[in-house]
Structures are given as C-alpha cells and as structure tokens.
Image: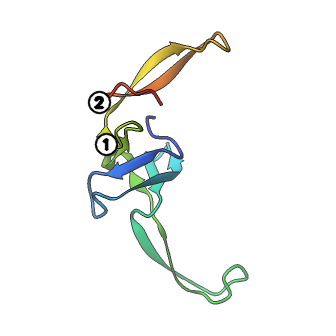
Amino acid sequence: MKIRKNDNVIVIAGNSRGKSGKVLKVYPEKRRIIVEGVNIMKRHTRPSQRNPQGGIVQREAPIHMSNVMLLDPKSNQPTRVGTKVVKDESIGKKRRMRVAKATGEMF
C-alpha cells in the first residue's frame, strides 16, 4: 500500500475534490482511508455517559484510496508514487522506500 498514516493527501474525485489533509486512519483490507477534514458526515447520537447532551455530531467518513493522491513533500503538488530498494547503512539491510515520480524525492 502506498498511502500510510500521517501522509498528506489531496482528494482528486468525489464531493470533497480539491480538499487536502492528513491521513488519520488506514483500512488496508477495505482499501479505504480517513482524511482529516474531508468527507464530513453527520451522525445522530443518543445521550450517553461519554456525550450526555446527544445531538448531531460531525465526523470524517472513510474515502476510497483511488480517490486521493499523495502530496509531494518537496513541491507540495499531487504526485504518483513508486518504490525503490535502498540499502540502509546503519542496519545493513535493504529497505523499500517510496519515491515521488515527479521529483524523485524519497519519503
């Protein structure tokens, strides 16, 4: 999976197109993610100990991964992502790093 928690993404399709935010949670088995401030839904809640008032609560709903693109850390523009195998000098093992196709920046 190319999108991970705490990545910055931009929505490229759907009602929230053009909005960007940080990935809060990833559901790899369903290929969905929750992005901060994107795809807001209203949930009617009953009064409970946690929320004694009850009422309407707004929160983010999951969005499909195909509807978002990662933002390049260097240029802050949407970019496709590839992978590159790099040898980690401190450990001596090979690691797979993500590479932005536009600038070649590793993250």
Say which mark, if any, is on residue 57.
none
Q: Earlier in the sequence, mark 1 or mark 2?
A: 1
Report the number of numbered marks: 2
Q: Is residue 104 above or below residue 12?
A: above
Counting other residues with Cα less than 10 Å from the Cα at mark 2, is it few (<14), some (14-19), or many (20 or more)?
A: some
Find residue 92 and report its image quarter: top right
- Measured in 3D between alpha carbons, the distance from the residue under mark 1 to the one under mark 2, in whole angstroms, is 9 Å
Point out residue 90 in the picture as x, y percentages from the top left corner.
67, 14
Q: Is residue 61 above or below residue 3?
A: below
Q: Which residue is mark 2?
A: 102
Amino acid, disc 2:
Ala
Front residue of 104/54: it is: 104
Q: Are marks 1 and 2 in contact (CB under 8 Å)?
A: yes
Q: Is residue 95 above or below residue 103?
A: above
Point out residue 75 in the picture as x, y percentages from the top left corner.
34, 39
Front residue of 47/9: it is: 9
Counting other residues with Cα less than 10 Å from the Cα at mark 1, is it few (<14), some (14-19), or many (20 or more)?
A: few
Q: Residue at x 26, y 54 (%)?
A: 13
Q: Which residue is mark 1?
A: 77
